Amino acid sequence: MLGNILFWILPFVLACHGVVLSDAHSATEKSARWTPRSGAGGQAKPPQKPGYVRMPVSRHKVKGTRKHHGRPGKPPRPGRGPAEQDSSSATAPSLAPRRSSARGWGWSSLDELGGTVYIIELGIGTPPQMVKVLIDTGSYELWVNPRCDTSASESICESQGKYYPNWSSSSTYVGGDFSVTYGTGAVRGSYWADDMNIAMFEIPRVQFAVAEDSNYTFSGILGLGYAYPYTIKYPSVLDLMASQNMISAPIFSLGLGGDQDYFSEIIFGGVNRWKFAGRLEPVPIWPPVSKQDRRWIQYWVNVTSIGMTKPGERGVIYTPRDTFAMPVLLDTGSTLSYMREDLVAQIGQQFSATVDEAGNYIVDCSWRDRDGTVDFGFNRGRMVINVRYKDFVYQQYPGHCMLGFQPADAGSTHYVLGDTFIRGAYLVFDQQSDIVWMNQYYNCGDGVVTVGEVKGDIGDIVGAC
C-alpha cells in the first residue's frame, strides 16, 4: 500500500466508508466526464485529450543499527488467501474476508530496522500544502497526517509534511469515521475533500482521510488498489484522474528499479517503453475480479514457477513445470515476499541460510555481491522475472541480511510478492482489463507512451531496451 522498510499486508478496515461527496458518484458513473476549468478571461478551457501523469518516486534510505533482533515485521495473516490451483480452473477459490487480515509492524524503530521507503509528493488545498505519501498497491484510500510522536520513526514522520484543512480556502469537511488497523499500528480520523495537485495537474474535490490519531505509522498512504464501486463508495485519486480525462483509464505503471539503479517512477495512464525489452506479458488478475469479495478487490496473480540461476550455471526450476500455480498478492507495501515454507526452505538451502530463533531465514550478506538471480515465472514460462541477488537479499542492517522471501504463517495461503520481487520487474497495473502487465526491468533510456485509449492497447507496445 510501502517501501523498503514496511511489512504491511491488507489493512483491517474497521469503519464503514459510506460518507461521500454529493457529486462523487455522478463523476465516476459518467466515467470520462470533463469538468470545465476557467482559463484566461474566465472562459472554460476546451476538453483535453487524455494523456499521462508522470511522477518521480523518491527513495528515502534509513540507516539501520544492530539494536533490533526480533522477527522484523512478520505480517499476521489470520485468514487464508486464494488457494493454489491452475488458472484455467473454472471455479476460483474464495478469498479471506477483508476483516480477517491486518498489516503488521514488527519493530520498535525504523532507524533500528533500516531500509528504503518509496514516496511521492502531493499538493493539497489552496494554496497547495505539500505532503509526502507512500505508494501502496495493497490498499485503496488516501490518508494524510500521521501522529509523529507515536510513529515508528519520528524523524521520517516530521519530514513528510502536514495538511491543515483550515489553511485551505477550498477544503470541505465531509465527515464520517476513518479507522484502519495495521497489526500493531493504527490510524483513525475523518473525511475531508479538497483540490489536489499531482505533478503539474490539479484534481478538484478529492475525498481523503485526515488522521486525528495514529501510532507506528510514520507517513500517509496513497492506496492504488481497486476502489469505487468496490471497496469504497467514493472515487479514489486514480478513479478521478480517469473520470476527469487526465488519463484514459485507471492504469498506472511502476518501475522501482534495483538497488544500484537510483531511478524510480510511477506513471498514471502511461508506460515508459525504455524500461523493458520486447512486449509486456499480460498476467490476468486471479482469482478474477468477478470472483473476489467485492469489498476487497486485490492485485492477485498466479506465479507458475520459482527457481534460481546461479553464477555461471543454467537456471533451475524448483516447482512442477506444468501444474504449479500459486496466487500471490503484488504489494508495494511489503518489504519482503512471503511464500510456502517448503519453497522458502528450498531456496534458502541454496543460499546456505540459517533460521534464527524468530523464524527468519538469515543469509550471508556476501550473496548480494554475486551475479545470480532468483527467478519467478508467469503464464507457464512466457514471462520470467529474474531478480538479482542484490535486490532479492534484504540487508536489514550492515552485516545482517535476510532471504528475500520468508514463510507465510502456518496454514495460510496468503502469499505476497513484495519489493524483493518488484524491484526486478516493470509492472503495469491495468484496472481497465483486469491485468497486470509485466516484463524484466531495465533502464536503457526514457520515453513514455500513453495507454488506455483502447482496451488492451498496452499489448501493442514494444520495449526499447
Image (spheres, rainbow, N blue to C red):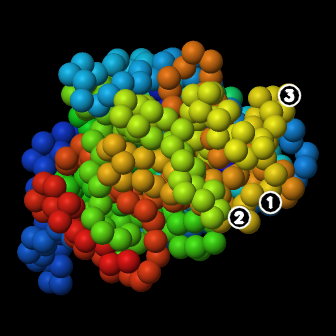
Q: Which residue occupies 69% across, 53% down?
A: 393
Q: Nearer the viewer, residue 43 or 109?
A: 109
Residue placed under numbered mark 2 in the picture: 370
Q: Which residue occupies 13% across, 72% down?
A: 48
The secondary structure type at the circle numbered 3 is loop
- Give the number of the mark in front: 3 or 1: 1
- Residue 202: x and y in percent read 31, 66
CB under 8 Å between discs 3 and 2: no
Q: Is residue 202 above or below residue 88?
A: below
Q: Is residue 294 above or below residue 384?
A: above
CB under 8 Å between discs 3 and 1: no
Q: Is residue 223 above or below residue 18?
A: below
- Residue 431: x and y in percent read 25, 46
Tell me the number on the disc at residue 357.
3
**Residue 181 in view here:** no
Q: Which residue occupies 36% across, 53% down?
A: 383
> Going by the image, does 305 lie left or right of 172?
right
Residue type highlighted by circle 1: Ser
Tell me the number on the disc at residue 254.
none
Among the 4 quarters of the image, the one containing residue 399: bottom right
Whole-number angstrom distance, CA of label 3 to CA of label 1 = 22 Å
